[in-house]
Image: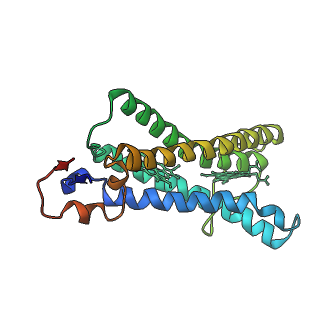
Amino acid sequence: MNTLRQDARTVFHPLSIATHWATLVLLAAVYALIEFKGIFPKGSDAREAMKHWHFVLGLTVFGFVALRLLLRAAVPAPAIVPAPAAWQQRVATAMHVALYAFLLAMPLLGWLTLSAKGTPVPFFGWELPALLAPDKELARSLKEVHEAIATLGYALVGVHAAAALFHHYVMRDNTLVLMLPWARRWARKPAPSTLIEG
Ligand code: HEM
Ligand code: HEM
């Protein structure tokens, strides 16, 4: 069995790890709230509450991803051991850019949609300013784009998660371990800074 030891500095920053997994939980809630709102009749309090929390948690995703991008700029991503082929690293980078773009675009499009509809934009008891003047036609187009990218998001996250599992179980590198909450504790175990045994 392969044994990999990482230097403690070469795993993701703990805040990056925490926000990564919190984003997964938030996204699951954001999708579930809007996909299942139809179980309650139109205009009911429960349905309105589901939409409300879709907006609020969706905007929270934006806050988390902004924090992650700041961290990413300050602390470089750790290296994968053994290093994948250069083309795989290019695909991974393209995938990360797509994921970050998705995480930024979706809340912004939602915010723009509500603004164009002339609907208040709620955020934990506050009301965020409208980004656009009301325009029903524009609101409809923005909503369509928001919904189309949301569908694309399922595929994006699915491929990303499958790739992480492929790295772990098939390529047997440390990709998944770098992102696990216990990575740091594990990395600090006394051992050579990087040891790979066949
Ligand atoms: C990561 C963040 C988000 C994701 C993944 C997401 C995803 C979705 C999905 C899957 C739908 C339903 C699509 C359909 O029915 O085909 C939807 C609808 C919608 N979302 Fe989002 N959304 C996000 C954030 C937001 C935010 C922050 C807002 C507003 C502040 C927002 C406003 C809306 C609106 C107005 C609709 C249409 C609801 C309706 O039909 O009544 N979304 N979103
Ligand atoms: C079961 C679900 C998931 C698994 C197993 C997983 C696993 C991982 C792993 C192992 C990494 C670090 C390795 C790498 O790809 O560089 C990573 C990074 C990343 N993940 Fe996930 N992830 C999951 C869900 C998500 C979700 C829902 C999102 C948001 C849409 C997401 C966004 C990202 C981003 C943007 C990075 C790049 C980090 C960086 O280098 O800056 N992941 N993920």
Residue 192 placement: quadrant: bottom left
Which residue lies at the image location 54% right of the left edge and 43% below the top edge? 159
Residue 102 placed where, x, y %? 56, 42
Q: Mark yes or no: residue 140 visible.
A: yes
159 horizontally vs 2: left or right = right
- Total labels: the figure holds 0
The residue at 33%/55% (across/down) is 177
Q: Quadrant of the N terminus?
A: bottom left
Coordinates of residue 101 in the picture (x, y in percent): 53, 39
Q: Nearer the viewer, residue 91 or 27?
A: 91
Q: Name which quarter of the figure residue 90 lies in.
A: top left
Identify which residue is drawn at 19% across, 49% down.
197
Answer left or right for 56 relative to 94. right
The one nearer the camera, 40 or 167, is 167
Relative to 92, is 39 on the left or the right? right
Residue 127: in sight, yes or no? Answer: no
